[in-house]
Amino acid sequence: MRRPPKNSFWKTRLRIRAYRQNGGDCGESTTSIGCHSAGWWAFGLWSPIKIYAYGQSSQNIYATTIHELAHASHYNMDKSDFKKTESKVKESWARGVQWELTRMVYPDYRAPEIRPYYTLVIMDMIDDNNRFGNTFPTGESVNGYAIRQIEDALKGQRTWNGLRDNIKKRYNNETEENLDALFQYWE
């Protein structure tokens, strides 16, 4: 996967600031435990990533930090597209990276509850678990995509359907005929 921005002469350092409170103001929500502000890179003086997970478990703090770093990496990959990308695409991507990387340190990590823009579509494209029993409309029959494949398909895509269509166009996967139903389920 692509890395978040690194220090260089023309690129300021990526700062992460942790607050001594549980839940903070991140624009659209006053109870978020983390946020990424793409426009706050000015000369490395401010922190574009803020963590408001004081008193939470190390697993939750780690997962939240990974989620916000995924936003920073996505922004760094394509700044103009990031700003115009639908929230559902941004948040679902970051939630997928959060799940994938947090499991490397905490193998039993489960993705948190689903909020309107924070879907588990990325996780569903990667894993072969049927978490929903037989009630999932597609039988959760999409799997086998690599996180890097999804990241590569994300570049230049601003919309939910654009991401889905780019994945289908770029990769052959024996379960791709179910991508439409999977994306529609999370819509």
Image: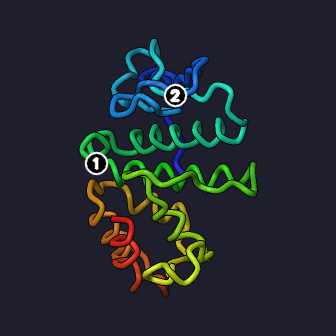
Q: Residue at x 52, y 56 (%)?
A: 96
Q: Residue at x 72, y 36 (%)?
A: 58
**Residue 109 coordinates in the image, percent (x, y):** 69, 54
Q: Dividing the image into 4 quarters, which one contains the C terminus?
A: bottom left
Q: Are marks 2 and 1 in contact (CB under 8 Å)?
A: no
Q: Residue farthest to the front?
A: 135
Mark 1 highlights which residue?
A: 85
Label whose residue precedes the other's in the sequence (2 or 1): 2
Q: Is residue 17 left or right of residue 56?
A: left
- Dot 1 lies on which element? loop
Residue 178 vertical placement versus 107 (above, below): below
Mark 2 highlights which residue?
A: 23
- Dot 2 lies on which element? loop
For the residue marked with disc 2, what is the amino acid?
Answer: Gly
Q: Is residue 73 left or right of residue 127?
A: left
**Residue 107 coordinates in the image, percent (x, y):** 75, 56
